[in-house]
Image (cartoon, grey):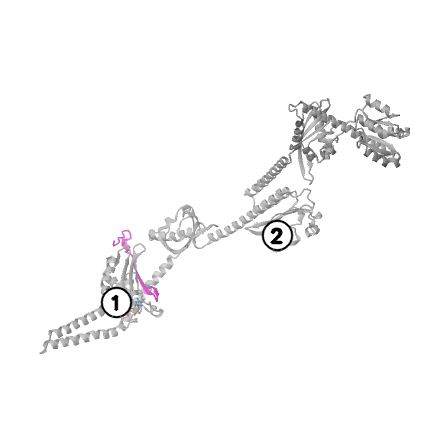
């Protein structure tokens, strides 16, 4: 801002000053100050009273006899005119003291030693300038006072009140003259301009503005002073004491004083917060736009299905180079202290793909230790200047970040340049790099998962077992080629179906309910299923069905694997039949051996019969024949004969295979009959008998007498086994339940001491017994009977807490579609 030169120069009056000094002052002070030389004080007073040009300073020379008095008179006219009294150097101090204690003089009267004429022009210029400014200030004050006088609040407090108001107002108010010199300023304006009122008045406002802003302020004042439209407010940047920028919005209005003088009023308001908020918003907007651009770039790369992962990563490196303005981009894998380049762009072959380095020789050595990106703009001018990446690699700028895959360090993603980066990396750059690294991490994880899945699905495709994967709703999602081969169904036919089409009808609903109960509760089912192929034939499948769970442990799918064991089942059946045949033959062959034993056994009752019969005869024919004694003898005969008959019967059954009187039998009735038979024995031996017969027990095709024999035999054995245990424990439980659709399974539990292994191994051997009066043929015969019915008899549970014998009877094949239960 330039101040136009004053139209009228100021005036300095020299009174009684010698000519040489007057000449010097004239030549030095022009054109700023005009110099008037007067011979005596009277001429000066005439000038002042006559209303001549206002005098801006007076020099009283050595020619005057009483300069102090003259000064006093001048100050009567105007106490602000600066006066210099020339004095001999030796008298200066004395004169100073006189002036100090002169009641009519202010501090604008100064003694000046005559031996310092060269300093006089400058002092005069300053003094005159001070006076002119003071006059301006007085003008401003009087104009303000005049305006206040116009206010309705014409009270003495009004001006004070307004001053207070202005001083406490949060806005700065400054008035300047048309030249830009400050006339008034309130407290807030002083704070803003960082100047005290005393130092500010009369100064050019522009001088208090930062240098960079002065031109704009000058233009604003010029526009305001011109007759054109009023300029709008402008924001100027100041610096507060601590160096932080502050923003002041400055608006201005032209003023006209009562004297007709013009000026400008400036209103200055601190808008730092608003500007900061605006700048923050702009920065955030810019960042957001940047993020959006990068995200769009990511999206384009990741959604391009034509790109391989390698191509995608390479495109990402290029995107990063562009983004950060750095020519080199590297994706590395870090393994211990080895840094291996997975892919790179730029770098002119310095970072070949597959190339390795020692991790700590690279900037990435630090990066892997930090969760945040590491960035340096100018390594040579920072603490990084001794790092090998700079000293040997010559990399000036670098920004890098860790890459994690599944929460584990994988490597680094970094960008670098051999030249320093002119701009520091912003927080947005760091955020974008983090975003890139997360994207790389997730792409690598997906690739890993895909590779894993490819391996798994390859294995499933190659597997020899038939595999079915269903969703939670049990709809098939996948079957492998082995499934197609086994069942004859093609995958297109079964995907989206439930597995019901495989059911053979040989398992009841309960069977499937139990199966789903196991896997539905997260368990694994293992078992044999009889299923039906597409061509209608049946097959036995050894199946394992497991639930598949997600990360949260929720079941999402079921996977079933299985293989055909039909041949095995057949072979086992054959084997079983064969073994039964062998056992039968073995039993027959023992018949020969038995004969002698039987002869002996039968001999006993026969001898007894003979003896009893002879005795009875003798009694009947004798002289003292007693009917009582004869009856006893005959009864013994009958008993022994029955025993012999029993032995024969057992023998017959033992040897018999086939020859049965089969009919459809309700086993519930058979069980109840056996319970009746053993009732008395059980009571006598203190055994509690319990029956647990399932409802809907199917009728089986069997010889009821033989089944009765088996049950009786097993029940008697059970009661014998409990003879040695304490009475409360003696409990016999006979259970019957359905086996498959048409079969029945029987169980005879006792709570005896069980049988030791050496006994268990030989249970079914003919004549094996541990009982003193046992025959050792009961179990053998029972097994023979059950097998003759195509069933199976075996010892299932056996411990020192008791034994359980089980046998099964298969269903009636002819009645497959009309199963009738006994209920
Ligand atoms: P026996 O009539 O001689 O007992 P079995 O053939 O019926 O002949 O039984 C053979 C052997 O099997 C018995 O002597 C006994 O040792 C054992 N045994 C049979 N049933 C049981 C059982 N419920 N608990 C313990 N051992 C048993």
**Residue 283 or 490: which is nearer the viewer?**
283
Q: Which residues are magenta?
A: 796-823
Tally the marks: 2
Residue 487: x and y in percent read 39, 51
Residue 378 locus on image (x, y percent): 69, 46
Q: In this orientation, which residue lies closer to the viewer: 358 or 135?
A: 135
Find out if the beta carbon at label 2 lies less than 8 Å from the nearest ligand 1 atom. no
Kindly identify which residue carries mark 2. Answer: 369
Q: Among all residues in the image, which is located at the extreme bottom?
A: 623
Instruction: Write down which quadrant ligand 1 falls in.
Output: bottom left
What is the quadrant of residue 63 in the picture? Answer: top right
Question: Which sits earlier in the primary sequence, circle 1 or circle 2?
Answer: 2
Instruction: Provide the residue designation for mark 1.
Output: 685
Residue 358 visible in the picture: no
Residues 739 and 176: in front is: 176
Secondary structure under badge 1? helix
On-image quarter of the N terminus: top right
Q: Is residue 366 visible?
A: yes
Name above or below for residue 292 compared with residue 406. above
Per the model, the C-alpha gap separating discs 1 and 2 is 83 Å
245 left or right of 471 in image: right
């Amino acid at each position: 801002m330039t101040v136009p030169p004053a139209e009228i120069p100021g005036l300095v009056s020299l009174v009684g000053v010698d000519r040489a000094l007057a000449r010097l002052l004239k030549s030095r002070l022009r054109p700023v100050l005009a110099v008037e030389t007067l011979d005596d004080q009277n001429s000066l007073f005439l000038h002042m009273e006559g209303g001549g040009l206002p005098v801006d300073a007076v020099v009283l020379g050595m020619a005057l006899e009483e300069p102090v008095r003259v000064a006093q008179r001048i100050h009567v006219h105007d106490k602000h005119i600066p006066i210099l009294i020339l004095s001999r150097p030796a008298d200066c101090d004395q004169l100073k003291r006189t002036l100090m204690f002169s009641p009519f003089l202010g501090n604008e009267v100064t003694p000046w030693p005559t031996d310092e004429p060269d300093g006089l022009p400058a002092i005069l210029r300053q003094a005159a300038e001070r006076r002119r400014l003071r006059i301006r200030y007085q003008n401003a004050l009087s104009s303000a006072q005049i305006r206040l006088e116009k206010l309705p609040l014409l009270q003495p407090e009004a001006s004070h009140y307004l001053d207070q108001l202005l001083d406490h107002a949060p806005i700065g108010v400054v008035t300047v003259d048309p030249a830009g010199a400050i006339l008034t300023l309130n407290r807030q304006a002083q704070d803003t301009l960082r100047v005290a009122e005393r130092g500010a008045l009369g100064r050019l406002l522009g001088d208090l503005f930062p240098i960079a802003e002065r031109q704009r302020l000058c233009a604003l004042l010029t526009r305001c002073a011109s007759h054109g439209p009023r300029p709008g407010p402008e924001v100027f940047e100041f610096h507060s004491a601590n160096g932080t920028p502050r923003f002041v919005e400055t608006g201005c209005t032209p003023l006209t004083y009562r004297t007709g003088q013009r000026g400008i009023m400036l209103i200055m308001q601190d808008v730092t917060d608003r500007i900061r908020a605006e700048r923050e918003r702009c920065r955030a907007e810019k960042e957001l736009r940047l993020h959006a651009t990068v995200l769009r770039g990511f999206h384009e790369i990741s959604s391009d299905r034509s790109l391989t992962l390698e191509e995608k990563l390479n495109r990402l490196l290029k995107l990063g180079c562009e983004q950060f303005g750095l020519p080199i981009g590297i994706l590395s894998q870090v393994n211990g202290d080895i840094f291996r380049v997975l892919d790179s762009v730029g770098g002119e072959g310095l970072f070949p793909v597959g190339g390795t380095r020692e991790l700590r020789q690279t900037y990435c050595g630090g990066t892997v230790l930090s969760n945040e990106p590491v960035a340096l703009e100018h390594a040579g001018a920072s603490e990084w200047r001794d790092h090998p990446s700079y000293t040997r690699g010559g990399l000036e700028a670098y920004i890098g970040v860790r890459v994690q895959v599944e929460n584990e360090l994988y490597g680094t993603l970094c960008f670098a340049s051999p030249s320093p980066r002119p701009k520091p990396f912003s927080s947005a750059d760091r955020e974008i790099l983090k975003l890139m690294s997360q994207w790389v991490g997730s792409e690598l994880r997906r690739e890993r998962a895909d590779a894993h899945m490819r391996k798994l699905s390859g294995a499933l495709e190659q597997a020899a077992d038939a595999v079915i994967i269903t969703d939670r709703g049990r709809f098939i999602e996948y079957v492998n080629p082995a499934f197609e081969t086994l069942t004859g169904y093609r995958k297109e036919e079964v995907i989206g179906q439930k597995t019901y089409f495989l059911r053979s009808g040989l398992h009841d609903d309960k069977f499937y309910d139990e199966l789903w109960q196991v896997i539905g509760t997260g368990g694994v089912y293992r078992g044999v299923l009889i299923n039906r192929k597409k061509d209608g034939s049946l097959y036995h499948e050894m199946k394992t069905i497991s639930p598949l769970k997600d990360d949260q442990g929720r079941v999402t799918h079921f996977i079933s694997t299985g293989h055909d064991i039909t041949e095995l089942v057949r072979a086992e059946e054959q084997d079983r039949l064969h073994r039964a045949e062998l056992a039968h033959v073995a039993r027959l062959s023992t018949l020969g051996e038995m004969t002698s034993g039987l002869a002996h056994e039968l001999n006993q009752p026969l001898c007894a019969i003979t003896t009893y019969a002879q005795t009875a005869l003798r009694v009947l024919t004798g002289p003292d024949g007693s009917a009582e004694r004869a009856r006893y003898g005959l009864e013994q005969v009958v008993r022994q004969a029955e025993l012999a008959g029993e032995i024969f019967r057992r023998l017959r059954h033992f040897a018999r295979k086939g020859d049965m009187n089969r009919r459809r039998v309700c086993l519930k009735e058979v069980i109840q009959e056996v319970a009746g038979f053993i009732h008395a024995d059980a009571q006598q031996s203190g055994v509690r008998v319990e029956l647990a017969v399932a409802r809907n027990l199917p009728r089986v095709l069997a010889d009821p007498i033989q089944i009765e024999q088996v049950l009786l035999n097993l029940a008697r054995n059970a009661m014998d086994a409990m003879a040695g245990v304490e009475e409360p424990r003696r409990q016999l439980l006979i259970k019957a339940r359905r086996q498959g659709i048409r079969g029945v399974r029987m169980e005879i539990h006792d709570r005896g001491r069980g049988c030791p292994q050496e006994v268990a191994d030989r249970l079914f051997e003919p004549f094996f017994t541990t009982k003193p009066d046992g025959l050792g043929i009961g179990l053998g015969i029972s097994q023979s009977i059950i097998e003759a019915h195509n069933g199976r008899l075996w010892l299932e549970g056996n411990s020192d807490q008791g034994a359980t014998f089980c046998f099964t009877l298969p269903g009636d094949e002819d009645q497959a579609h009309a199963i009738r239960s006994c209920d």
